Image (cartoon, rainbow, N blue to C red):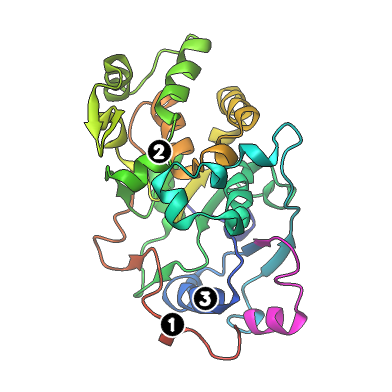
Amino acid sequence: MANIKHNNACFFLISARKNVLYTCLSHLDKNYNFQYNYPILIFYHGNKYDDVDYQTEIHKINKKTKVSFHKIEAKLPEHLSEKDLFYNKTDVPYVKKSFSRDRMGYLHANYFWNNFMNYPELKDYQYMIRIDDDSWFKKKIKMNFFDELIKSKKLVGCGYTWNHVHHRVLDTRINFYEWIKDYVKKYNITVKNLKLKLYLDEGERDIVDGRKCNKNFHSMDFLCGNFNIYDRKMFETKEWKQYLNEFNILGGGYRYRWGDCEVISMFYYIHMGDSFLDLELKKKNIYANTLPNTKMIKKGLE
């Protein structure tokens, strides 16, 4: 079994919710990290976690684990304007119903999730697990996640995959299919995943909830996005840097709310070919993407 040293593997997340973060990290420690003490890096915008008393409470969870807080700038890229942003697409049902201007912070977080590998705080880590601040580690976990990734000889993995197609999915993937097709064509790329190659050749031939799409494309297995595990090697390739540059120039995370689950999944299929590692943590009932209810939240830390 591979021996992953603590100084080249970590957990990281971006958080804006004090009321769930403590509970998330408590369960992570109690059910997994007490065995390894992998560092945990918490990124945040604004002054949310400047509170030293709160940080002290977090450090008390396990004094052997290095937990660090990192304030990062929330700034719209200069080539984008406010009118370009996803929350202005009021003709999109999801936007109209539940994505108002107040969720600008989510769009900034979206930028972070797709660009995390370029933040200097993470540069010394070869292996990284990205979680959400309400991820729930439900039971004792015996496997070493990083060992599983290395044994699989894959560069990306996740706690579970999802492949649902419904209006909410399509609302947050506007123009994504076309952008992937254009990217492949622009750089004359031979798509390595044969299913994806076929779906891109098919065009948008289906109708779902009254809109044109390629259902097969949107039904592929995507990273869950709330528990992703990475080997930095993939993000050091010229192909990734080229792909990310195209994504950032377009502003896909800001304009369309494309998340890391879509962006990184499609890059993997295009350039790596096979599927990423699925740890099946949900199927094993040891992980869930959100905490069950507020009763689990430690009082006084909201």
Magenta extent: 43-58
Q: Which residue is mark 2?
A: 153
Q: Secondary structure at mark 3?
A: helix
Disc with the residue nearer the chain's start (1 vs 2): 2
Label number found at residue 294: 1
Q: Amino acid at mark 1?
A: Thr
- Density class for disc 3 (Cα within 10 Å; few <14, some 14-19, many ≥20) is many
Q: Amino acid at mark 3?
A: Val
Q: Determine if residue 302 is in view.
A: yes
Q: Residue at x 42, y 37 (%)?
A: 173
Residue 96 vertical placement versus 54 (above, below): above
Q: Secondary structure at mark 1?
A: helix
Seen as rendered, the residue at the extreme bottom is 299
**Structural distance between the alpha carbons of marks 3 and 2:** 34 Å
Residue 206: % across, % down = 23, 27
Residue 85: % across, % down = 60, 41
Label number found at residue 20: 3
Q: Which of the pair 28/167 is nearer the observer? A: 167
Q: Are marks 3 and 2 in contact (CB under 8 Å)?
A: no
Q: Which of the 4 quarters of the picture holds residue 81?
A: top right
